[in-house]
Amino acid sequence: MSYEKLAKIAELLYERTKNNNIKWEATESHDVFQASFSHSSVRIEETQNKFNRHETDIEITVINEDGEVVEQFTDEDISELLEKSYQKNGGYTKKARRDALGVDVTLDEIIEVLSSTDNNLIDDDDF
């Protein structure tokens, strides 16, 4: 396994996500998010640590153009090569989740409704 390349992928995912240059999407699996490229994709998720069930790892899965998993690694695997690997990978995992689920759009809508003085938020039929 080429940990140097995996650490580079994790670093670039962190930078691109931080700068809003990657489109993350929800997958069929709960809390697994995917970014697709022309001939490959990556998935990220939080998983239970193999050695300590009270800790989590960030797992990155690399998928080729045929949909096959070609590599899978955690922040733990690359921690010696990527400074603050858990914090970086965890940071973009949270951002990927927010982007994929449209959290900011939903929050903006709620703020708009609550801020509007024109909307009666209570249906008179409820009383």
Image (cartoon, grey):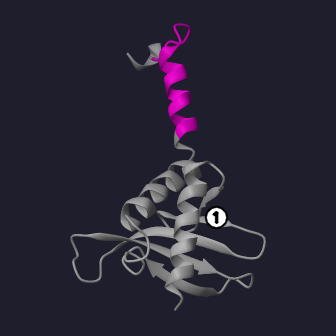
x then y, percent, for residue 21: 66, 52
Q: Is residue 113 something one can see in this rendering?
A: yes
Task: Work out whether 24 lies above or below 32.
Answer: above
The picture places residue 80, in percent across and down from the top left corner, at 37, 77
- Give coordinates of residue 96: x percent, y percent: 53, 55
- What residue lies at 37% left-to-right and 65% top-to-bottom? 86
Q: Which residue is mark 1?
A: 35
Is residue 20 shown above or below 123? below
Q: Residue at x 47, y 59 (%)?
A: 93
Quarter of the image containing the C terminus? top left
Label 1 Cα neighbours within 10 Å, binned few <14 / some 14-19 / many ≥20: some
Q: Is residue 104 left or right of residue 64?
A: left
Farthest-out residue, top: 117
| Relative to 93, 87 lies left or right | left
- Report the side of 24 relative to 1 (left or right): right
Amino acid of disc 1: Ala
- Mark 1 lies on a secondary structure that is strand
Q: Kindly tell me whether residue 33 is visible in this rendering.
A: no
Residue extent of the magenta highlight: 104-121
Q: Quadrant of residue 65?
A: bottom right
How far across and how far down the image is residue 35, in percent? 64, 64
Number of numbered discs on residues: 1
Front residue of 87/26: it is: 87
Who is closer to the viewer here, 98 or 12? 12
* Overall secondary structure of the magenta section: helix
Residue pictured at 57% horizontal, 80% vertical: 5
Asked if residue 92 lies in the magenta stretch, the reply is no
